[in-house]
Image (cartoon, helix red, strand yellow):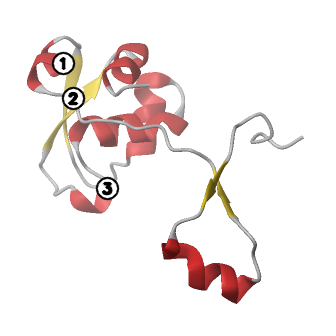
Amino acid sequence: MSRYKSLETMINDSDHYKKLKEKRGLKDVVQYPVVPLHNPNLAQRLMIATEPHIWSTGDHFYKLAHQYYGDSRYWWVIAWYNGYPTEGDIKKGANIDIPLDLVDALTILGM
């Protein structure tokens, strides 16, 4: 059974996909809705306990997520909380904050 079977879908009828639909012979573009997230503001950041981390050679979001949350699939929480879309955007020596409570972090991020 597909893990997506229970998720609602939407038909995207934007003109943006017109050429794609013609090229692929599609009637519709079916998409899964995206959960809107937001970057935490200062007040929200002050409400959550974090651990400072200095980015060094060999660091990866998924490794930090495994270390702090026991699940590497939550790498994106650390990335999003710090406003870095990818590891390539972080310079060696940069300071990042790791939210210690995953549930609190997900709540602040709008999940």
Q: Quadrant of the N terminus?
A: top right
Give the mark nearest the N terminus, 2 or 3.
Answer: 2
Task: Find residue 95 and report its image quarter.
Answer: top left
SS at badge 2: loop
Judge whether 35 appears above or below 70 on screen.
below
Q: Position of residue 69 (x, y in %)?
A: 46, 23
What kind of residue is marked 2?
Answer: Pro
Left or right, 44 with reference to 17: left
Q: Residues within 10 Å of mark 2 (few under 14, many from 20)?
A: some
Badge 1 local density, few (<14 within 10 Å), some, or many (20+)? some
Left or right: 100 as drawn, with respect to 1: left
Q: Secondary structure at mark 1?
A: helix
Residue at mark 1 to residue at mark 2: CA–CA distance: 6 Å
Q: Are marks 1 and 2 in contact (CB under 8 Å)?
A: yes
Left or right, 31 with reference to 43: right
Q: Which residue is mark 2?
A: 40
Q: Nearer the viewer, mark 2 or mark 3?
A: 2
Name the one closer to the observer, 67 or 98.
98
